[in-house]
């Protein structure tokens, strides 16, 4: 691999990049790339992919001087403002170092704990979004992974004292931390400790009371809106509110109600309101003449064009299929038309789909490719048609989402087209499920 190829593969979390580094005669030439990926969140969506701490630390461990990476990670970790997902990755990496015996990494984790706790303790009010609050809870989870139940007890005691002295307990949320502890140490052990010690410690009792009061809140009952309520929501200035109401309305609406809504949407001239009204037909067939949907697909408004393609996916006619193939061949609305083709796919469409996918740009800034890749994966799972291995491998190497890559690997394996060398490199993939799957199948 060239340095450029290595960076693209490594930032995607591919096992091939790890093996390239491991087998390289001069791993020093990749050192700056490994560090860059440690200090940046290279996940497409960490919420579904998970942290890449293990993958990154395994790469770091191939170098004799790990302090080069550790010092830089600690320096960045000490910054005041950090994105929550990057913060979690840095926590994960420092956990790996500390778990491997590094005193510096351990000190950095506990120092950050003290800094964040002090900062939150001094707040008198807090907004619904607070990165320091989220980061603090993440950090507490990592500390219980590092130091076990002892750390859990210490954190419960300290946060409990905070709850006793504060008038606003929402400054620190610990419900996920508590749930994670039950998964980590066992529900019975955590429950026994908390209830037994709540009788002896006011701090433990305060912590338990706060957690239980949070869990006892009844979820809001969401009723199905009427057409009148939907129209009122769509005419409100909020950009997104009407969309959610439209989706809920469409779930139970009768054909007559949907037809009435469609007539209103057709005559609406305000594009923002029209978009909200049409949102109901992303999951339900448009009940009027489909020609109107084709007109929407030519709109100057990008959002309306996008919803038009969603509406087409709910319709079934040769005209829909011909329109999708026409656009792909003309390189117009490629992402939307490829997704549409997946929903009206015919056996003779393979070369068109393969060429379209290979020509689709993949980047962090534009997520259109991600939707297309997921639609293709759904098609591959459902379809009995044979597809070129080249398309599977292109998606495997190009996707920025390690979760989607894992699904693709499993689909290739089920189709009995997964190359053994790819399965072997999956042992070192950044995604935990991919590593487990490869180990199981190779075993």
Image: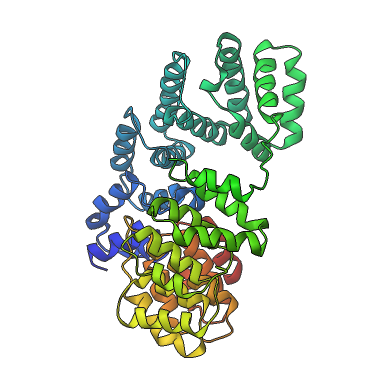
Q: Is residue 391 shown above or below 436? A: below
Which of 190/224 is in front?
Answer: 224
The scheme the figure's colours follow is rainbow
Quadrant of residue 268 within the rendered picture: bottom left
383 vs 242, nearest the viewer: 242
The image position of residue 69, as x and y in percent, is: 31, 42
State the residue in front, 34 or 294.
Answer: 294
Q: In this view, does 166 lie to the left or right of 292?
A: right
Q: How many marks?
A: 0
Image coords of residue 128 (percent x, y): 48, 29
Residue 324 vs 178, above or below: the answer is below
Q: Can you tell which quarter of the image residue 392 is in?
A: bottom left
Residue 429 visible in this rendered orientation of the protein? no
Quadrant assignment, res 107: top left
Residue 94 drawn at (x, y percent): 42, 37
Residue at the spot 30% in from the left edge and 36% down from the top edge: 71
Q: Residue at x 38, y 58 (%)?
A: 303
Image quadrant where one finds the N terminus: bottom left
Q: Name the residue: 46% across, 25% down.
A: 127
Left or right: residue 163 compared with residue 371:
right
Question: If the image is split into quadrants, where does the C terminus sit?
Answer: bottom right
Q: Residue furthest bottom?
A: 348
Q: Which of 234 and 57 is in front in this view?
A: 234
Q: Can residue 32 be seen in this view?
A: yes
């Amino acid at each position: 691999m060239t340095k450029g190829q290595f960076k693209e593969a490594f930032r995607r979390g591919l096992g091939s990049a790890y093996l390239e580094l491991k087998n390289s005669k001069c791993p020093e030439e990749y050192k700056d790339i490994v560090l860059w990926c440690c200090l940046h969140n290279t996940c497409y969506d960490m919420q579904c992919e998970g942290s890449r701490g293990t993958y990154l630390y395994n790469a770091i461990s191939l170098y004799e001087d790990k302090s080069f990476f550790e010092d830089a990670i600690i320096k960045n970790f000490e910054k005041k403002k950090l994105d929550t997902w990057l913060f979690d990755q840095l926590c994960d990496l420092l956990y790996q170092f500390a778990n491997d015996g590094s005193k510096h990494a351990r000190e950095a984790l506990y120092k950050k704990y003290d800094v964040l706790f002090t900062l939150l303790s001094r707040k008198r009010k807090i907004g619904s979004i607070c990165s320091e609050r989220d980061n603090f809870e993440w950090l507490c989870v990592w500390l219980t992974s590092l130091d076990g139940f002892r750390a859990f007890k210490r954190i419960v005691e300290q946060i409990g004292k905070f709850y006793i002295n504060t008038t606003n307990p929402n400054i620190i949320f610990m419900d996920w931390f508590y749930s994670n502890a039950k998964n980590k140490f066992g529900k019975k052990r955590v429950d026994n400790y908390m209830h037994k010690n709540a009788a002896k410690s006011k701090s433990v009792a305060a912590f338990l009371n706060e957690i239980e009061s949070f869990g006892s809140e009844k979820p809001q009952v969401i009723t199905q809106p009427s057409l009148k309520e939907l129209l009122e929501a769509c005419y409100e200035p909020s950009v997104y509110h009407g969309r959610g109401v439209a989706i809920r309305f469409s779930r139970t609406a009768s054909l007559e109600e949907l037809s009435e809504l469609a007539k209103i949407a057709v005559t609406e001239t305000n594009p923002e309101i029209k978009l909200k009204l049409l949102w109901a037909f992303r999951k339900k067939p448009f009940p009027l003449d489909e020609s109107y949907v084709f007109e929407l697909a030519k709109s100057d408004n990008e959002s309306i064009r996008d919803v038009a393609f969603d509406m087409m996916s709910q319709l079934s006619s040769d005209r829909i299929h011909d329109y999708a193939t026409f656009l792909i061949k003309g390189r117009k609305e490629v992402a939307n038309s490829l997704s549409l083709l997946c929903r009206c796919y015919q056996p003779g469409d393979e070369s068109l789909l393969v060429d379209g996918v290979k020509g689709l740009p993949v980047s962090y800034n534009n997520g259109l490719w991600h939707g297309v890749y997921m639609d293709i994966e759904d098609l591959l799972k459902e379809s009995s048609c044979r597809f070129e291995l080249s398309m599977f491998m292109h998606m495997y190497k190009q996707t920025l989402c390690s979760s989607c890559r894992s699904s693709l690997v499993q689909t290739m394996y089920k189709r009995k087209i997964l190359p053994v060398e790819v399965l072997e490199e999956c042992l070192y993939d950044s995604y935990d499920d991919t590593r487990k799957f490869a180990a199981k199948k190779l075993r």
